Image (spheres, helix red, strand yellow):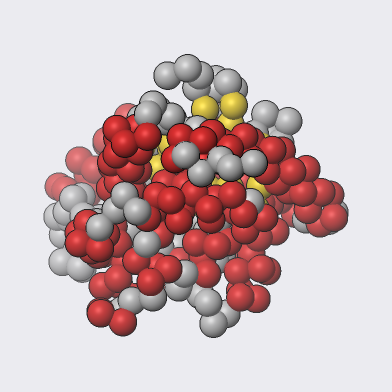
Amino acid sequence: MSQKTVLTGDRPTGRLHLGHLVGSIQNRIKLQNEADKAFYMIADVQALTDNADNPLKVRSNVLEVALDNLACGVDPTKTTMFIQSQIPEIAELTIFFLNLVTLARLKRNPTVKDEMKQKGFGEDVPAGFLIYPVSQAADILFCKANIVPVGEDQKPMIEQTNEIVDDFNRIYGQTFDHVKHLVGDVGRLVGTDGNAKMSKSLNNCIYLSDSNEVIEEKVMQMYTDPTHIHVEDPGKVEGNAVFAYLDVFDPDTKGVAELKAQYEKGGLGDVVLKKRLVGVLHDVINPIRERREYLAQDPKKIMQILKEGTEEARRVAAKTLAEVKEAIKIHYF
């Protein structure tokens, strides 16, 4: 790798949640202090692949995801924050990369298959949605990023990007580095309902902007052990969402281990556990929410940060696209 360049992004389809925090935001904050360059993309084009009939939903959430990231500690003096749709070079790269990918390969992508099933697309999947792994490769490679912090479920996307890198370099000459995926300490945070993944579309999230009252309400409804009916009953730790969250967010690991032993033995009620988790999550979310509320008072300033970052990203994209066109032999003038 010639230099350490990091790219991450979020789809602006709603405010961000705890799964985003531990899955990628914590890594992007850490890496912005270590990388030579760091980019953060608000993926509005990608969001339109399954929200084409509701563009206002996408537009209204651009500011929301920017606020979430800034409140968590993404620093615009260290990370170039930009809006995907304002970089037309990404769309051009996508067209060139599509020539290197087959329809069969796109349909085999595990992440795409899972999301198609979740959204009920079947064979009526929008073409833009089916090809978004190729668009994602262009998102990554326009700035020659070689490190991408992702959730566990996004690893197949990075694999497909590296296939495109290999094919492009083989056919046209060495142009791009391989991309390394970097999964956070928690590859996937379970939903509050015990589902395998916290997801906006499944409505099983605790958001970084949730109030203390909302956090408490959601925690009190969390999935635990359905067979643990009475306090004295032995309970199961495995698959228990409350313990999954305590493992991630409670700094007192010894105390959590003692609670697990007591729960499995019997004599510990779910309400006690949930109240402990409420306190832990208040400590995590309160500083983020308070900073978010402060930043939200000046939305023009946030949009100016995105405008300046987008202008910088556009300069980088133009340079990469010129190299790509020269490699493909379509640099005529």
Furthest-front residue in this view? 332
Q: Is residue 294 left or right of residue 257?
A: right
Q: Is residue 290 above or below residue 126?
A: above
In percent of the image, x 66 and y 47: which residue is there? 82
Q: Is residue 256 visible?
A: no
Q: Is residue 140 above or below residue 211?
A: above
Q: Is residue 102 visible?
A: yes
Quadrant of the image occupied by residue 270:
bottom left
In percent of the image, x 81 and y 56: which residue is there? 299
Quadrant of the image occupied by residue 283:
top right
Q: Is residue 93 above or below residue 130?
A: above
Task: Give the total of numbered labels.
Answer: 0
Residue 30, how many percent across, how many down? 53, 27
Residue 109, how many percent across, how many down? 24, 56
Furthest-top residue in this view? 2
Q: Is residue 331 left or right of residue 70?
A: left
Choose between 236 and 316: the one closer to the eye: 316
Choose between 52 and 264: the one closer to the eye: 52
Choose between 242 and 152: the one closer to the eye: 152
Can you say which quadrant of the picture contains the C terminus?
Answer: top right
In percent of the image, x 68 and y 69: which residue is there? 60
Can you say which quadrant of the picture contains the N terminus?
Answer: top left
Residue 280, how many percent across, how many down? 49, 45
In percent of the image, x 39 and y 50: which residue is there? 97
Residue 275, how many percent across, how many down? 44, 54
